[in-house]
Image (spheres, coloured by chain):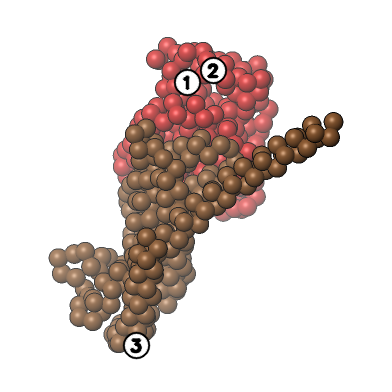
Chain colours: A brown, B red
């Protein structure tokens, strides 16, 4: 397992290096958007990772609620995926704002996709706050799993209501019959999806491991405290 | 099940009537907000006319937060929720009953706020009939989500901070749809039907989700 994680880490570093090389040096500037178009090699991939992370969080939460598959493993995975997802969602919003300023003339606009991404961010910030609440682990895990699913069912409602409200965002670049991107630009964009997915997987594995170790440490500390207390009681008994 | 839900609703409303907490806190808070909005937006210009539907629903949402906290605070004293669990009532009935009680309180609040908006913001509500489905569906959505999240926050510390953090992002599409539908109802917006549909879908989805999820939530509370 350790070896697999190391291979994943090495693959992530290599793919990110290739991405930086292509995105900054190989791909020529865009005819219309100039250097700003280079953000297309980061921004869509961060959004993709965000949706993947929240999808994993929802799936793990659902598995934690089913009695047959209930386990703290799924709770830890859901928490780790949501944390990494919130970071990538924040990155998607920031890179979008950096691109929006020169192209649209504003840092922020109430465009449908921007607004629904911002709401998604706040939904999962609330979920993470709930995860930090006190209480027995199993009860907190079940509560968090329900909260994740309640948040997830809001996503399509948010998406469609905001879509009907207003749309300004650039249309689809890749997922259409005649993609508006080709050649080395298309390769670099697809590579960004691979590189950031590997980065996500690597961070997720480590976040999951840290969370598990933290839980083990808390249990070990409690056991140690109980042993110490028993020794104290025993010593006091002997002295009497 | 509906008889049991009615029992829970009656219990909550009876406690509210006797304690008068909503009358003493929630309604004055909502009215103060209406006055403060006018200070912030300059009532002499046409801004208030246009913003009135949004301000109305923001006032309802923020006041709903107080009402939700109140709805679960009455269960935390004297182990009342433990007795409710042991009463043999089904969790779905408890959820629907508590949501209905919250909904009734919100509808009363909306009527008072609507009068406030007409008087203070000089809004023409001659097409008020169109506002009835908007108010009913929005209230159902707020009450359903509020009851789910109220039961979460009832079991944890720092509930005052957590409830708005979880509740407001989920309810955001309701604020959007209710405001647009209200604008259309008073003749300053379009697509009334579409927004009423969004409100209906939201209310049905969250009433169903709450009915399913309230069992495990009650165990944990």
- Is the same chain shared between marks 1 and 3? no
- Answer few, some or many: residues within 10 Å of disc 1's Cα (few below 14, many 20 plus, some between 14 and 19): many
Does label 1 or label 2 sit earlier along the sequence? Answer: 2
Q: Is residue B79 left or right of residue A171?
A: right
Q: Quadrant of the N terminus of chain B?
A: top left
Q: CA distance from mark 3 to mark 2?
A: 67 Å
- Answer few, some or many: residues within 10 Å of disc 3's Cα (few below 14, many 20 plus, some between 14 and 19): few
Chain of the residue under the numbered disc 1 shown in the image: B
| Label 3 sits on residue | A25
Q: From where the camera sits, is residue B109 visible?
A: no
Badge 2 marks a residue whose secondary structure is helix
Q: Quadrant of the C terminus of chain B?
A: top right
Q: CA distance from mark 1 to mark 2?
A: 8 Å
- Answer few, some or many: residues within 10 Å of disc 2's Cα (few below 14, many 20 plus, some between 14 and 19): some
Residue A172 - label: none
Looking at the image, which residue is at 52% across and 30% down? B220
Q: Is residue B36 left or right of residue B187?
A: right
Looking at the image, which residue is at 37% across and 60% down? A1
Chain of the residue under the numbered disc 3 shown in the image: A
Q: Residue furthest right?
A: A240
Chain of the residue under the numbered disc 2 shown in the image: B
Badge 3 marks a residue whose secondary structure is helix
Looking at the image, which residue is at 38% across and 55% down? A53
| Label 1 sits on residue | B94
Q: Is residue B84 left or right of residue B1?
A: right
A217 w.r.t. A1: above or below: above
């Amino acid at each position: 397992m350790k070896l697999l994680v190391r291979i994943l880490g090495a693959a992530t570093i290599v793919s990110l290096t290739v991405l930086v090389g292509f995105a900054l040096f190989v791909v020529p500037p865009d005819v219309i958007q100039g250097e700003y178009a280079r953000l297309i090699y980061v921004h869509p991939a961060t959004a993709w990772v965000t949706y993947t992370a929240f999808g994993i969080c929802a799936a793990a939460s659902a598995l934690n609620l089913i009695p047959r598959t209930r386990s703290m493993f799924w709770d830890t995975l859901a928490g780790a995926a949501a944390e990494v997802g919130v970071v990538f969602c924040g990155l998607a919003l920031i890179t979008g704002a950096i691109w929006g300023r020169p192209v649209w003339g504003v840092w922020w606009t109430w465009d449908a996709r921007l607004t629904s991404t911002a709401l998604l961010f706040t939904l999962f910030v609330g979920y993470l706050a709930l995860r930090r609440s006190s209480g027995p682990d199993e009860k907190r895990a079940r509560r968090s799993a329900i909260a994740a699913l309640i948040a997830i069912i809001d996503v399509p409602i948010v998406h469609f209501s905001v879509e009907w409200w207003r749309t300004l965002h650039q249309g689809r670049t890749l997922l259409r019959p005649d993609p508006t991107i080709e050649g080395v630009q298309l390769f670099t964009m697809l590579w960004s999806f691979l590189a950031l997915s590997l980065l996500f997987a690597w961070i997720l594995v480590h976040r999951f491991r840290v969370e598990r170790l933290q839980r083990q440490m808390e249990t070990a500390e409690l056991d140690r405290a109980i042993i110490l207390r028993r020794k104290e009681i025993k010593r006091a008994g002997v002295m009497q | 099940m509906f008889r049991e839900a009615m029992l829970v609703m009656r219990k909550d409303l009876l406690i509210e009537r006797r304690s008068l907490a909503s009358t003493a806190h929630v309604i004055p808070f909502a009215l103060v907000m209406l006055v403060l909005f006018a200070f912030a937006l300059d009532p002499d210009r046409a801004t208030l006319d246009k913003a009135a539907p949004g301000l109305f629903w923001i006032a309802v949402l923020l006041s709903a937060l107080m009402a939700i906290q109140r709805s679960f605070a009455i269960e935390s004293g004297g182990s009342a929720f433990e007795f409710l669990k042991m009463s043999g009532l089904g969790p779905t009935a408890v959820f629907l009953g508590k949501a209905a009680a919250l909904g009734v309180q919100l509808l009363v609040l909306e009527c008072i706020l609507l009068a406030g908006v007409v008087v203070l913001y000089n809004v023409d509500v001659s097409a008020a009939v169109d506002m009835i489905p908007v108010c009913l569906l929005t209230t159902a959505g707020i009450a359903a989500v509020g009851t789910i999240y109220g039961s979460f926050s009832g079991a944890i510390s720092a509930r005052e901070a957590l409830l708005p953090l979880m509740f407001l992002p989920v309810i955001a599409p309701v604020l959007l749809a209710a405001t647009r539908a209200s604008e259309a109802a008073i003749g300053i917006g379009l697509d009334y039907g579409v927004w009423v549909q969004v409100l209906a879908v939201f209310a049905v989805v969250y009433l169903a989700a709450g009915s399913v999820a309230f069992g495990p939530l009650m165990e944990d509370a």
